Amino acid sequence: DIQMTQSPSTLSASVGDRVTITCRASHNITTWLAWYQQKPGKAPKLLIYKASTLESGVPSRFSGSGSGTEFTLTISSLQPDDFATYYCQRYNSFFGPGTKVDIK
Amino acid sequence: QVQLQESGPGLVKPSETLSLTCTVSGASISSYYWSWIRQPPGKGLEWIGYIYYSGSTNYNPSLKSRVTMSVDTSKNQFSLKLSSVTAADTAVYYCARGTVTTTGYYYGMDVWGQGTTVTVSS
């Protein structure tokens, strides 16, 4: 089965910082990767699908890239609303373990 | 807009079967994949499986022996049954909509329920 990993598991950053989260798949998943943001007590929210396509309504400071087995989610300038946990997901199934972005 | 609402018992006894239903409003259940995802307290998201509106299913291998999903298109609902539960099944359970086109293009899980907490305890 294809395993998903993320790094780092926790990331401490300040407002305005550029933040990058990495997701790796154990086998080639081409570009079938989605990214989600989850805040405490809330359901996850879709940010990006097909590795780099921004979901409607998601701020343009979020971007995704990658293909094959390595993917990145970048927040160009971290905003107060962005402190949350981020998950990658492969094609309609398994999620990565998550990356918590907290305040430095 | 499209909304999903999970419903079912919040407390289930060990060894019994957990049963949840997700009601879809604002859109037809047809032409989408409908997933169940859970999140144990303080942990990450675990995909349980999905059911297509036609009834075809795909389950997480780690849970496959205990999971059954079904869909009722007349009621715009889909359901999850998880048998022989233990304390490890205590979690917030989410239902979500996944869009996959006929050519296999995956648009992500774009609509989620608010989640329902299920505790397994005697």
Image: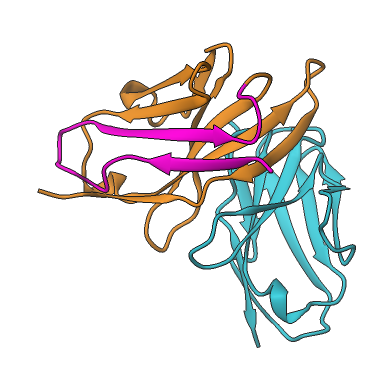
Chain colours: A cyan, B orange
Instruction: Give the image location of residue A71, x and y in percent.
Output: 78, 50
In the image, B6 versus B68, the foreground residue is B6
In the image, B114 versus A46, the foreground residue is B114
On screen, residue B90 versus residue A94, left or right, reads: left
Looking at the picture, does residue A20 appear above or below residue B44?
A: below
In the image, A91 versus A39, the foreground residue is A39
Residue visible at 48% across and 64% down? A41
Instruction: Give the image location of residue A63, x and y in percent.
Output: 86, 58
Q: Residue furthest left?
A: B122
Please tell me how many numbered marks the rendered image carries.
Answer: 0
On screen, residue B39 versus residue B29, left or right, reads: left
Residue visible at 70% across and 75% down? A81
Instruction: Give the image location of residue A43, x and y in percent.
Output: 55, 55
Looking at the picture, does residue B36 appear above or below residue A7?
A: above
On screen, residue B92 versus residue A42, left or right, reads: left
Looking at the picture, does residue A61 appear above or below residue A92?
A: below
Residue B15: within the magenta? yes
Residue visible at 62% across and 69% down? A84
On screen, residue B20 versus residue B44, left or right, reads: left
Instruction: Give the image location of residue B98, x and y in percent.
Output: 66, 33
Residue visible at 47% across and 26% down? B78
Query: What is the magenta range?
Result: B1-29
Q: Quadrant of the N terminus of chain B?
A: top right
Residue B104: within the magenta? no
